[in-house]
Image (cartoon, grey):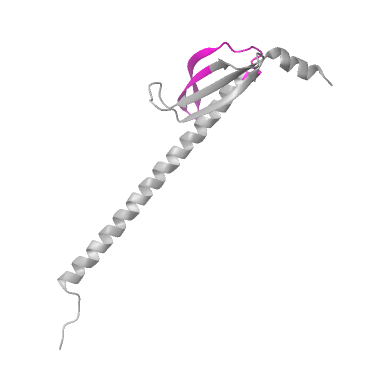
Amino acid sequence: MAQRGFTLMEVLVALAIIAIVLGALVQAAGASASNASRIRDKTVAQWVAANRLAELQISGTFPETGTKTGETEMLGRDWHWKTRVQEVEDEDLRRVDIEIRKTEDAKNPIVTVAGFVSHPRLQSQNTSQP
């Protein structure tokens, strides 16, 4: 009567294949978690930048040219912003570039948003017209 079963070599090959597949699955799960975290950070940073730009647009003052830094808390975390205000050809507009970082000394911003702020006298003229 012949014995049935797997040889040692067949078992080792099967274990090697299982180990490779499980390793790939673990790596894919780790990459997915990392991507989800990066997307969440980028989304929140976009909100912080949009809020900062909106604050400048509705402040009622014309922003001075130059660079300012600060931090804002959102979703339980501090976000560091850098606002650069520049003159443009139209003297009633200012260009605003806002960079958002996780930490103050981070080399690269998570997001950069550009926008414009108009002179407050233009805003009051637009609201007083019927």
Q: Residue at x 60, y 20 (%)?
A: 55
* x and y percentages locating residue 29 in the rendered image: 37, 50
Q: Nearer the viewer, residue 114 or 78?
A: 114
* x and y percentages locating residue 74 in the rendered image: 51, 27
Q: Main secondary structure of the magenta part?
A: strand
Left/right of residue 118 with respect to residue 12 in the rendered view = right
Highlighted range, magenta: 57-84
* x and y percentages locating residue 33 in the rendered image: 40, 44
Could you tell me which quadrant the C terminus lies in?
top right
* x and y percentages locating residue 65 in the rendered image: 55, 12
Q: Is residue 121 above or below residue 81?
A: above
Q: Residue at x 43, y 39 (%)?
A: 37
Q: Nearer the viewer, residue 51 or 120?
A: 120
> Which image quarter: residue 126?
top right
Q: Nearer the viewer, residue 6 or 45?
A: 45
Left/right of residue 127 with respect to residue 95 in the rendered view = right
User: Is 69 contained in the magenta span?
Assistant: yes
Q: Is residue 28 above or below residue 39?
A: below
Left/right of residue 25 with respect to residue 59 in the rendered view = left
Q: Residue furthest front?
A: 89
Q: Is residue 23 above or below residue 101?
A: below
Q: Residue at x 23, y 64 (%)?
A: 15
Number of numbered discs present?
Answer: 0
> Which image quarter: residue 121?
top right
Q: Residue at x 51, y 19 (%)?
A: 83
User: Is 123 contained in the magenta span?
Assistant: no
Q: Residue furthest bottom?
A: 1
Could you tell me which quadrant the N terminus lies in?
bottom left
